[in-house]
Image (cartoon, rainbow, N blue to C red):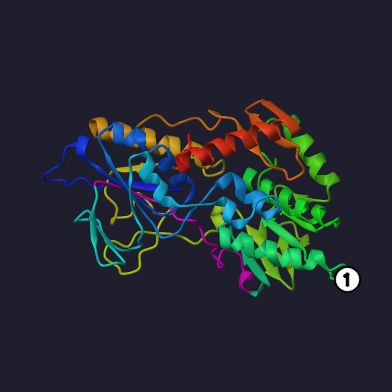
Amino acid sequence: MPKAYDASPSTTPRSPHHAHVVLVGSGATHFYVAAQCARLTRAGARVTLVTREPFAFPDWLGGMLGGEWQRNDVLLDPAHIERHGGEFRRAEVTRIDLEGHRLTLDDGSQLDYDWLSLDRPARVDPQTVPGFYTAQAVHDTRVESLWGLRQVLETHLADAEATLPNVVVLGGGPPGVEYAANLLALGERYGRRLPVALIETHRRALPGACDRANRWLARRLDQRGLQLELVANVTRYEDGQLVLDDGSWVAADRLLVVDSHRHAPQTLTPTGDEPSFGERASPRDPAVHDRLVTGDDSDEALPLPARERAALLIDRLQNALADGAPDAPRSPASARWQALNLGDLRDIAWRGRLWCRGRWVRRLKHRRDRAEVDHFRGGG
């Protein structure tokens, strides 16, 4: 989740209508901000995106894992932000000077900013679970990691004599469900049942959906062979198994970590040569300015989807650009429909107590996703 920092000098503040908003990184939230950055430019801001990595369309990552999409289908050139009124710098940040409101890039140039948002694809922190480092492979939700997992699994699935590895998805709420369902779909494409387990700390697989939707989803995934462990915490990994807090265990040859709490802690280094970025930077860190604008969700147990985080971040930045007060009202988590690709052409969608599922949901979701991709590319 991105953090956006007020970098206005405390002595000679600049006009908010000429502020420079810099987006560092190609995380999922920045994709939606980049696609809608015309809202910020209309508010008088100059918007610059800094990254060397392409965007990955978030709603197609599960489908890529399940064999529906190829790697190049989900990757989008970040330079398309220029079609929406923004600027693009193909570079990485090597230094952040919070006092001087300046970034140093790896090409030697410098970039001044007024508001800074940091959002890079998360990496797994091997220290969050004892023994993680002994696992055969631990994957995260970056494109290359998911693509590598798919290639390994397809090699096993294509060999009728090969023993299939046990794959465990750790948490993540709805995204974790989508990845687990598409792993099942990958096996189904080869006519084999891939051993997949999903471990979730919540008591429901879809915390924001009603009980009926969760019961249908649990039955559907059970019919397809998913081992679903709810209200479960992993205490350690040893001998090819994840040991849960009730003493039970789950066989795990390969791990896919979706839970953001198991991502590497990311903090800001104001003068270091190798800063890390993102979601765990604390507003109480003395290196961070005393006013913080964020697209984050205050309830970490129910994180907002990337679309919601982007909408909240844009709203708060617009508020800050207008009057310097970033305290815009928090967008409700149920403001939009959420939909998941379950990999079997029967998707599920919900908003609070309302929910639906079936092939027509699949068609509508695909239409929405395709429209968002075409819009970012400048085709609509």
Who's the residue at 61% across and 73% down the image?
133
**Magenta region, residue range:** 114-133
Q: Is residue 122 magenta?
A: yes
Who's the residue at 23% across and 30% down the image?
323
Q: Is residue 126 magenta?
A: yes
Query: Splitting the image into 4 quarters, where does residue 352 fall?
Result: top right
Determine which residue is flagged by label 1: 161
Q: Is residue 344 visible?
A: yes
Mark 1: amino acid: Glu
**Where is residue 9 shown, x and y percent of the image?**
17, 47
Q: Nearer the viewer, residue 221 or 150?
A: 150
Q: Nearer the viewer, residue 69 or 131?
A: 69
Q: How many marks?
A: 1
Who's the residue at 80% across and 59% down the image?
195
**Where is residue 365 shown, x and y percent of the image?**
64, 35
Q: Is residue 212 shown above or below 5?
A: above
- Left or right relative to 354: residue 112: left
Q: Is residue 164 visible?
A: no
**Where is residue 281 shown, x and y percent of the image?**
39, 54
Q: Nearer the viewer, residue 232 or 82?
A: 82
- Predominant SS along the magenta part: loop
Q: Secondary structure at mark 1?
A: loop
**Where is residue 99 shown, x and y percent of the image?**
20, 56
Of all residues, the one furthest to the right in this rendering is 161
